[in-house]
Image (tube, rainbow, N blue to C red):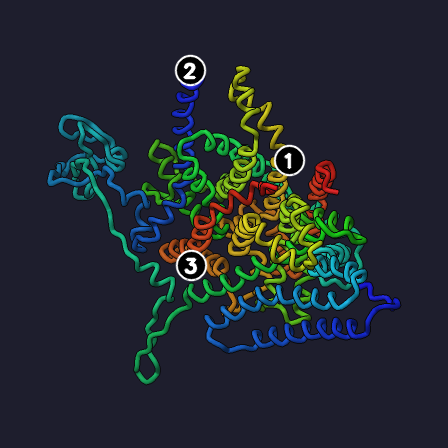
Amino acid sequence: MGTQAKPGIPLRAVLISLGILLANIVVNGLIFLFFRDSTLNPLLTAVLAVLWGVVGVYLIYYTLTFAAEQYPDKIRGRILPFIFVGPAVLLLGWLLVLPALRTLYLSFFDASSDKFVGLANYAAVFSDRLLGTALRNNLLWVFVGTLACVAFGLLIAILADRSSYEKTAKSIIFMPMAISFVAAGVIWKFVYYYQPGDEQIGLLNAIVTYFGGQPQAWTSMIQPWNNFFLILILIWMQTGFAMVIFSAAIKGVPDDILEAARVDGSGEIRIFFRIIIPFISTTILTVTTTIIVFTLKIFDVVMVMTGGQYDTEVVATQFYRQFFMYRNFGYGSTLAIVLLIAVLPVIFVNLRQFRKQGGF
Amino acid sequence: MVGSKKRKGNKAVVNIVLGIICFIWLIPTLGLFISSFRPAADILQTGWWKVFPHQEWKASNDVIRLSKDVDLRGPIEVNGKTYTDAQLKAGVVEGGKRLMWENRRARMISVQTEGWVTKPNLTTENYKNVLSGKEYKLKKADGSETVQKGSGLSQAFLNTLTIAVPATIIPVLIASFAAYAFAWLRFPGRKTMFVTIIAMLVIPLQVALIPVLKDYTALGLNGSYLGIWLAHTAFGLPLVTYFMYNFISQLPKDLFESAFIDGASHFTIFSRLILPLSVPALASIGIFQFLWVWNDYLVSLIFIGNQPNVQVMSMKIADLVGSRGNDWHLLTSAAFISMLMPLAIFFLLQKYFVRGLMGGSVKG
């Protein structure tokens, strides 16, 4: 922490800060061991664990800044920022940056990560039919899913803003966002459920048969269109997210500009495309990015609805299968890296946008 | 006032269109909600919408008996009209009545009339079973009976809560500290660190799973609360930091500059000024993080594994889907229980939510 032996650093301060650092590690380590081996009543464990998690973090910052305050002003000013950003940077380094590099490294090795195989895994990924399907499906998810979420979100936000029951409508559309993908899977199984015969308990098939059509096994039979029925679930869930954020952004559009445009005789559609859209363009980018990222790692819906069968496999489910079922670490890592490469353009656009915003 | 009149007309259209969209959005959840109160047998036999009053064909006392010499393969004459066998199998509507085979072998055709039916057969039994676990009676070798409970959702509910609350507060706190430093403190490497964090916004977490799992196994963090908190914290940090940075960096500078001159430390400024001022932002990003953690499946699946004492609800439900796909009554109520908490949080904190999303709207 930049504690070079310069004249003027009091030994007492150094000792105190080392002591505090050590105490933090020991105390939290002991608490961790306590929870790992505890046989307490589950409710009590839960309460204590939550207390530890929440208070513990605050105490770490508190004690570390206390240690920093033992130093003279100049040095304190240097240490303090690192105490503030330290935990974030350390955690991200340990659990995201380093793992990404290690995964890249693993992707050049064979199934048991013993033998260096160069680019063989990558060649295999792009030639394997199943993985090809997974990649294709992921693209489908990203394009169709994101586009629909953003478009619907924008449309509904605009409609809600002009309706007489904005709050209720927004709550209804947003509600699925609060539902887990797994629960949503159960919900939609009731929509897509198929059984041969007349009586259908799945809503979609009931509608189809009511109008004289043949019931369909939506999520399995009609490949590759079954993917769209899965994507529909994502749209149902994520549109609310886009809508809430767009709605907030639209409210940020100054009223006088809108009024001026109306006085000038601009129609609502023109106002939407010429004023509102440009005004909230950064928000649109942010929302799009968030949903793309969300969609790229889509896993739960597919896992719950079809388990990846019937050509609905996506990269994340394949990744899970390769890694946890076939124990093929090389393949699994390669898939993760392919996903990362797919995201690179998004990172680039975001960074550029961020710089344009004058972030730094 | 032509303009206002026109907008009023638009408003009716807007209200109707939005109403239709809202209705469509609600239907799937409504279906689950109603199904969760229906007995198992009903769920499997009829659609959930049948609990509402609807018209259905009901057999009346009228039965037409055909004579034994009618050839069922040829055209069948009933009351002066001819039908095919297939038609009678599916039922033909004739003058507000439906003719349908009642017993083909006995050559009986039932005459059905349409009437209003409701099937309001609702029960809370499903919820009871799911929450406390189904009761099984086991016979011991000595003939005595013991009642054993299958694993219920209550433990999973508690586990999910124990994971979700710290996994929401920890990243929000860590991110806020970091965001404050990035926004208002000057230190070497600040730019690089922050840009790296922004870049990590979009990194798919799959990239990290394998190495982190290896580290966790080595450190004994697998299946522990701390391990899963840290994982959720790290995976959520980039977004939360970015969000909090956007908010904190827009707070008016003089607000805490004067506090700093008065001798307040950065820590004091942070906890006495920044945190209270950021409540709307904290609440809104907190809700998001909470929802993500609460609803997460992949991260739990990998870092928690199969230990039943730490399993979360999404895993339980996914298990139910997989292993007992036909136990619809358990699935529906389990899914609904898992939705309760996030829905409650969302509706309670909705006010903060929208205010927080407006970002930086604090008047300076």
Q: In terms of depth relative to the viewer, which is nearer, B251 or B42?
A: B251
What label sits on residue B1 in the rendered view? 2
Q: Residue at x 52, y 17 (%)?
A: A263
Q: Which is closer to the viewer, label 1 or label 3? A: 1
Q: CA distance from mark 2 to mark 3?
A: 64 Å
Q: In terms of depth relative to the viewer, which is nearer, B212 or B321?
A: B212
Q: In terms of depth relative to the viewer, which is nearer, B78 or A2?
A: A2
Q: Position of residue A90 (x, y in %)?
A: 72, 60
Which residue is disc 3 drawn over? B324
Q: Is residue A103 above or below residue A218?
A: below
Task: Give the class, few, some or many, for how many residues have Cα within 10 Å of label 2's Cα (few <14, many ≥20).
Answer: few
Look at the numbered discs 2 and 1 and tell me whether their residues touch, using CB distance below 8 Å: no
Q: Which is closer to the viewer, label 2 or label 1? A: 2
Q: Residue at x 19, y 28 (%)?
A: B94
For the residue marked with disc 1, what is the amino acid? Thr
Which residue is disc 1 drawn over? A282
For the residue marked with disc 3, what is the amino acid? Arg
